[in-house]
Image (cartoon, grey):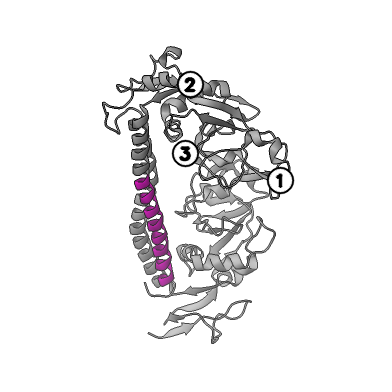
Amino acid sequence: MARSRRPTVNSRQSPDSETSDAPYELPDGWTWTTIGDACSVNPAMKFPEQLSEDSPVHFVPMAAVDDVTGAITAPQPRPIGEVWKGYKRFQDGDVIFARITPCMENGKAAIAKNLLNRIGLGSTEFHVLRPSDNVLAEWVYHFVRQQSFRNEAARAMTGTAGQLRVPADFVVQAAVPLPPLPEQRRIVAKIKSLFAESRTAHDGLERVPALIKRFRQSVLAAAFRGELTERDPIDEPASTLLARLGKSDTNQIETHDLPKLPEGWAWVRFEELLTELKNGHFSKAPAFEPPGIPILRVSSVRSRLVDLNDRRYLREKLDKVANYQLRDGDLLFTRYNGSLDLVGVCGMVRGLKEPILHPDKLIRARVTEGISPEYLELYFATRVPRNIIEDKAKSSAGQTGISGQDLRRVPVALAPLAEQRRIVTKIEALFAQADAIERAVAIARQRADKIDQAILARAFRGEL
């Protein structure tokens, strides 16, 4: 098949000119043009004469464009007079393309469809591309959604960090392959068909994380009902363990609203299992960079996780703050957070290699010898303690918090020590399987994305 060569378009040169460095040839009948010749870029729009100031139109903020599906989701009806000034204007059939980082790199682009009164107003961070009569909007949309085009656009961005934008000149001058209109229709239909198959795979993969989350929750719930492991008649009962440690059990808590426990287990207040419960060190402004003593941030603790790298630095001597130094096996609870879901979550400290402190917004719990801290870390991820913590949490100045006193009173479903260890081993094995599935799904999603991009690459080479 005869092929025409692509020009290097760094300025508004003729798309018919030939160069020796064209990246690929086009099929016979195709031509290289520019987006500026194929579309009106950011066209001016006059106030529609047929509409009044109160006429409804759709307002499209950046968040309303789905960067995965390319759909405009939940546009907001607004009176046109309220939004006409100060926003980007477009109409049905236009392609809107995010120009700001990171929205552009993420692929935020869409075809405007079914707009109220056929008019849309949206974020000024969109470029608007209005295809000419011999160019399909879908052709332009798929072209700007290519990863290769977005990479070129990213290299052309100007501005300051966090406010980088794709200049209009880049869009105007960007070279685009253009087949005859009937062939555009055939290729767009083929892309739609192949993407439908790909979307089915994507949808299946996107359901997996929620299924894995429910699986983990089910494992935890079963474990602390005693359904995950077998009873061993030689295990020392929890009540005997507590008595040997000089602790009390159900005599100090009300159990009528708590689930019934297996034989050999006992309900006990959390404080009976502790040697210490201590708030962290208060510091007004720890430094972002060394030198100094590392101190964790409140965001370092999530359910079943302590991120030792999420830290700041104190310009103090270690001996003055040694009481706040962490040890492996310490349990950390978030004391305050803006989100209730993240208040009172528990993670265990592991893998310490240097002195690290805990801050005032974290509570450190040290467990008495003979009780498994790994078991308690997992227990505090279940619904019984979470419901109690969320019920006791109090809000103030936009923050929600839990007191150490309320945390002490949380009832713990205590298994015999040997069974605690079996439960931890079983949960870790099942969670490791879940982790492996998540890694496999992440790889599969990357492959599916690459397939989509391969489809687009072949489409714009005329090879589809």
| Pointer 1 or 2: first along the chain | 2
The Cα–Cα distance between marks 3 and 2, rounded to whole angstroms, is 21 Å
| Residue at position x 35%, y 65% in the image | 190
| Residue bearing mark 3 | 304
Q: Residues within 10 Å of mark 2 (few under 14, many from 20)?
A: many
Q: Amino acid at mark 2?
A: Glu
**Residue for badge 2:** 272
Indicate the secondary structure of the residue bearing disc 1. Answer: loop
SS assignment for the magenta stretch, majority: helix
Give the total number of marks visible in the rendering. Answer: 3
The residue nearer to you, when weighing 205 against 418, is: 418
Amino acid at circle 3: Arg
Residue ID at (42%, 64%): 450
Asked whether 64 or 292 is in front, the reply is 292
As shown in the figure, which amino acid type bears the numbered disc 1? Ala
Q: Which structural element holds mark 2? A: helix
Q: Which residues are magenta?
A: 432-459
Of callouts 1 and 3, the N-terminal one:
1
Q: Which residue is mark 1?
A: 287
Is residue 410 on the magenta stretch? Answer: no
Residue at (52% x, 82% y) in the render = 22
**Residue displayed at 37% across by 46% down:** 432
Quadrant in which residue 198 is drawn: bottom left
Percent position of residue 84, x then y? 64, 48
> Residue 336: horizontal and vertical position, in percent?
60, 31
Query: Quarter of the image containing the C terminus?
Result: bottom left
The vertical placement of 162 against 157, above or below, is above
Side of 16 relative to 69 (left or right): right
* Front residue of this view, candidates 217 and 75: 217
> For the residues carrying marks 3 and 2, which lies nearer the camera in this image?
2
The answer to whether residue 426 is above or below residue 45 is above
- In this orientation, does residue 178 appear? yes
